[in-house]
Image (cartoon, helix red, strand yellow):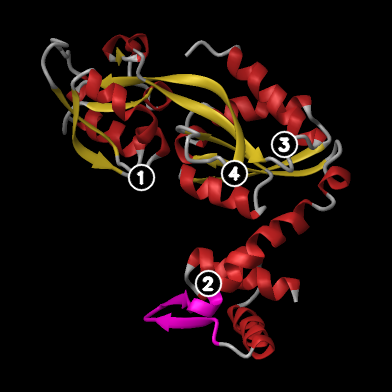
Amino acid sequence: MIENLETLEALSKHGTMLAASTELRISQSAVSKRIAVLEKYYDRKLIQRKGRRVELTQHGKRLINRISPMLSEIRDLFADEDFSGSGELTIGVSDAILSSWGPRVFHRVQSQLPDVRFTFHTHRTPAVLDRIRSGEFMAGVCTGSDRLDTDLQSEVLAQEPMVIIPSGQGVLDWDKRSPLDVISIEDYSGAWRSFRTEVRRLQIRRAVSLESFFSVAQMAIAGWGHGMVPIGVAETLGVPSERLINLGDEGLVRPVRFVARKSTYGVPVVASFYECMRAELNAIDF
């Protein structure tokens, strides 16, 4: 029964049989069979098709709301034993981190925890948080404010400065008393929500929004406009530091956070990973 409920949970997250089967590593027909067993057991329709997508019925949504916390607790049940000092640690990471300085830092951390197998998954911050809540990830390294994540426990590991890449990597003579139009990340990003007040204070106006900081940087490099990105993204793409306008001194930074469920925060391997990450990021001169 548990695996059938987990299948319904996967469908509620992904919305397609294919994505649910991929996550669960089973066939699409197996997904259908598990849902059929649940519907027969509860004598209720739990899913409905909308074109190529699958949506939960009202009965399905009510069931998911009840069982999701229970499934997370079950996943945590043996966490202290299974993750005492070895085993596999599944970590969700914001895509801009895993695409820039993250791999170097994680490699150094892994060398300090040789008995732990690291498995990384990259997503946008909201998706990382959702998968931590569900128990799919043991921990996450993501960006943005923690004001909306009261059900999770998080600590700020570092403050990564935001920078402006001048359009075409030219020279930007910016009078800070005048508004500056930039390309930057869109509203859904945890990073944007964390520093949008500071953006207004500095009279920086987002003229174009994109879904990826790397896309923002590439557009700026190509000359489509000034791009505002984390410094790690600019450095990864080889933008000369003398061309960048560093906004960190003006207080415009994105918080880099370590996040876990409160029930797993004290698990030894999670605590060790956190301490190693904190030490490594403290040594980085952003």
| Position of 156 relative to 37 (above/below) | above
Asked if residue 148 is positioned above or below residue 78 in the image, the reply reads above
Marks 1 and 2, how far apart in space?
24 Å
C-beta proximity under 8 Å, tags 3 and 2? no
Q: For mark 3, what is the residue?
A: 265
**What's the CA distance linking mark 3 and mark 4?**
12 Å
- Spatial CA span between label 3 and label 1: 26 Å
Q: Mark 4: which secondary structure?
A: loop
Please state the horizontal and vertical placement of residue 24, each as a whole percent of the image: 65, 66
Work out whether 236 lies above or below 216. above
**Quick one: label 4 or label 2, which is nearer the N terminus?**
2
Q: Secondary structure at mark 2?
A: helix
Instruction: Pinpoint residue 25: horizontal percent, then vertical percent.
Output: 66, 67
Q: Are circles 1 and 4 on residues that touch, CB within 8 Å? A: no
Task: In the displayed orientation, state which residue is furthest to the left.
Answer: 178
Compared across the picture, whether 179 is left or right of 198 comes to: left
Q: Residue 284's spot in the image, x, y percent?
A: 55, 14
Q: In the structure shown, which secondary structural element does the residue marked by tag 3 occupy?
A: loop
